[in-house]
Image (cartoon, rainbow, N blue to C red):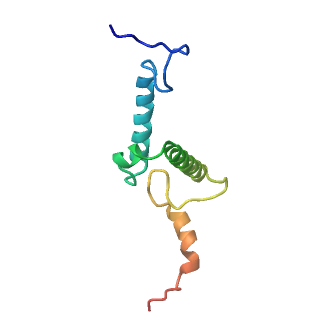
Amino acid sequence: MERRRHCPLGLTFFGLTPEFAPEFRKNLFQQIHSLVFHGKGGYDYATIYNMPIWLRKFTLSEINTFYENEKKAIENARSGKKGTKTLITPDGKVNTPEFLNATKDYKGKTSYK
């Protein structure tokens, strides 16, 4: 007859329990996917899978910071400052009067004569 030993703490080792393992795996694969997808070809699956956890988390936070800054820059560019004029209208056509005003300074100043 085989005798099982019981640890007074419930587990004989520190590790994943059956109820937490699926969630851990899901988080791991979400991190891998995020780094591979948002890394824009800079990483492959095997590299990320074997990457140390601390480095994986650091890389994710850096990518997140980059995309947040990029989003803010795009929003600032879209909102623009009041009083500024653009050469392109929102529908993608050239704003002719503004284009003519912007090019007045360049009339007759060509260097390819």
Quadrant assignment, res 32: top left
Q: Is residue 51 left or right of residue 2?
A: right
Furthest-front residue in this view: 1
In this rendered view, identify the residue nearer to me: 85 or 55. Answer: 55
Look at 55% across and 64% down and name the residue there: 98
**How many numbered badges does the structure rendering display?**
0
65 or 23: which is nearer to us? 23
Residue 107: percent from the left, percent from the top? 53, 81
Residue 84, above or below 20: below
> Residue 16: where, in percent of width, then height?
46, 25
- Decide: is 100 above or below 109: above
The residue sitting at the right extreme is 82
Percent of width and height locating residue 6: 48, 12
- In the image, is residue 67 above or below residue 84? above
Q: Is residue 93 left or right of residue 44?
A: right
Quadrant the N terminus occupies: top left
Rendering quarter of residue 8: top right
The x and y percentages for residue 104 are 57, 76
Q: Residue furthest bottom?
A: 113
Q: Residue at x 49, y 24 (%)?
A: 13
Q: Please tell me which residue is depicted at 39% across the width and 46% down the height of the picture.
A: 36
Q: Quadrant of the C terminus?
A: bottom left
Q: Residue furthest top?
A: 1
Depth check, front residue: 13 or 59: 13
110 or 36: which is nearer to us?
36
